[in-house]
Image: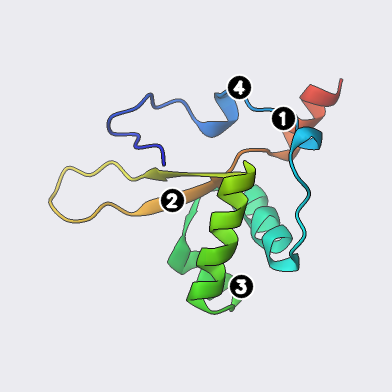
Amino acid sequence: MVNLIEEDTASVSERKTPHLSKLPPLNHDLDRIIFAVLQSEGPMIRAQLVRLIGAPRSTIYDSLRRLMLKGYVESFYEQRSTQGRPKTFFEARFYPNNIKKEEQ
């Protein structure tokens, strides 16, 4: 996981990422749905994905783990100035605009 409090704060779309075609295929329908939601809606926490998609929490967690292991999604922590556990956000590493740039 990338902790933006300690790491560089460049957005995921600004970081060097491999071309989408070089990543392993998404074999689960839910993985494709979550990836599409993160592409269209931007970074989200797990609870937002659970509410939006309606799948069980553990199923969403499993799918996010697969997406992260395959390189489609990254996570980062919110920056907090107060005590408490920071929220973990999940963000697609590829957006339609940066995919087109890489294909040209």
Q: Pointer 1: residues within 10 angstroms few (<14), some, or many (20+)?
A: some
User: What type is the residue that disc 3 sits on?
Assistant: Ile
User: Which mark is first along the chain, 4 or 3?
Assistant: 4
Residue beneath the point at 39% across and 27% down: 9
Residue at numbered disc 4? 16
User: Which mark is first along the chain, 4 or 2?
Assistant: 4
User: What type is the residue that disc 1 sits on?
Assistant: Asn
Mark closer to the observer (1, 4) = 4
Q: What whole-number distance in Å separates the C-alpha atoms at marks 2 and 4?
A: 19 Å
Mark closer to the observer (3, 4) = 4
Residue at numbered disc 3? 53
**Is residue 99 toward the left or the right of residue 53 in the image?**
right
Please determine whether, in this image, residue 8 is positioned above or below residue 92.
above
Q: What whole-number distance in Å separates the C-alpha atoms at marks 2 and 1?
A: 20 Å
Q: How many marks?
A: 4
Residue at numbered disc 2? 89
User: What type is the residue that disc 2 sits on?
Assistant: Phe
User: Which mark is first along the chain, 2 or 3?
Assistant: 3
Q: Mark 2: which secondary structure?
A: strand
Q: Pointer 4: residues within 10 angstroms few (<14), some, or many (20+)?
A: few
Q: Are marks 1 and 4 in contact (CB under 8 Å)?
A: no
Pinpoint residue 81: horizontal percent, then vertical percent: 17, 42
Q: Pointer 2: residues within 10 angstroms few (<14), some, or many (20+)?
A: some
User: Which mark is first along the chain, 1 or 3?
Assistant: 3
User: Which mark is first along the chain, 4 or 1?
Assistant: 4
Residue beneath the point at 41% across and 42% down: 1
User: Which mark is first along the chain, 1 or 2?
Assistant: 2
Pinpoint residue 30: horizontal percent, then vertical percent: 69, 67
Q: Mark 1: which secondary structure?
A: helix
Front residue of 67/47: it is 67
Q: What whole-number distance in Å separates the C-alpha atoms at marks 3 and 4?
A: 29 Å
Q: What whole-number distance in Å separates the C-alpha atoms at marks 1 and 4?
A: 11 Å
